[in-house]
Image (cartoon, rainbow, N blue to C red):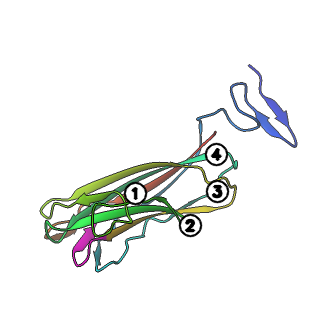
Amino acid sequence: MALTLDGTAGITFPSGSGTQAAQSKVLQVVMTTNNTTVSLSNGSYYSQLDTSITPLFSTSKVLIMVTLGFVGADSAADLAMNITRGSTALQQGTGGSTNSTYSPTMNVDSTHGNVGTFVLLDSPSTTSSTTYRIQALPNTPRTMYINRRGADTTICTSSTMILMEIAA
């Protein structure tokens, strides 16, 4: 199998689509990790996992994977999540809690640490730098802690966002 190198069109792979790498192949990976303990209350957002990627092709998909460690100050706390690309909401719910515009909403164990995992495939349709943000919002007037376990004030986990550009 031969590949074609064209000075204006790029590289064409035998099993590829157009002038980019073969479909469904990972082209690049970007990761942000944060282990700072943060307290959220009264409608404040956690947004310390902002991660940027510059897609190589406008046809590429971006696979977003987030792991967020959190706990509530009490068992009545809920944590609502939202994933954004710039100012565009990508995953946004329609009901279920006082924060009905964010999804998913999770009931929180106030004794042990919780880990929320979110996966989303996006089509940004650009080759410009693109920033993704996971927004975490506790239901008011509850308090949430990111990267912490219950009454234990020591860091018990890290939160991570991974962006993978996938050839499409």
Which element type, helix, strand or loop, lies under badge 2? loop
Which element type, helix, strand or loop, lies under badge 3? loop
Question: Which residue sits furthest right?
Answer: 7
Residue wearing tag 2: 86
Nearer the observer: mark 3 or 4; the answer is 4
Residue wearing tag 4: 60
Instruction: Please report contact status of discs 2 and 4: CB closer than 8 Å, yes or no.
Output: no
Q: Residue at x 17, y 72 (%)?
A: 73
| Separation of marks 3 and 2 at Cα, in angstroms | 13 Å
Instruction: Please report contact status of discs 3 and 4: CB closer than 8 Å, yes or no.
Output: no
Q: Residue at x 30, y 59 (%)?
A: 105
Q: Amino acid at mark 1?
A: Thr
Residue wearing tag 1: 160
Q: Quadrant of the C terminus?
A: top right
Point out the stretch of residues depicted in magenta: 138-147
Task: State whether residue 157 appears in this view.
Answer: no
Mark sitting earlier along the chain (2/1): 2
Which element type, helix, strand or loop, lies under badge 4? loop
Q: Is residue 2 magenta?
A: no
* Disc 1 crowd, CA 10 A, few/some/many (<14, 14-19, 20+): many
In the rendering, at what x and y percent does residue 78 appear?
24, 65
Q: Amino acid at mark 4?
A: Ser
Is 35 left or right of 52, judged from the image as shown?
A: left
Nearer the observer: mark 2 or 1; the answer is 2
Mark sitting earlier along the chain (2/4): 4
Is 5 left or right of 145, judged from the image as shown?
A: right
Mark sitting earlier along the chain (1/3): 3
Instruction: Please report contact status of discs 1 and 3: CB closer than 8 Å, yes or no.
Output: no
* Disc 4 crowd, CA 10 A, few/some/many (<14, 14-19, 20+): many
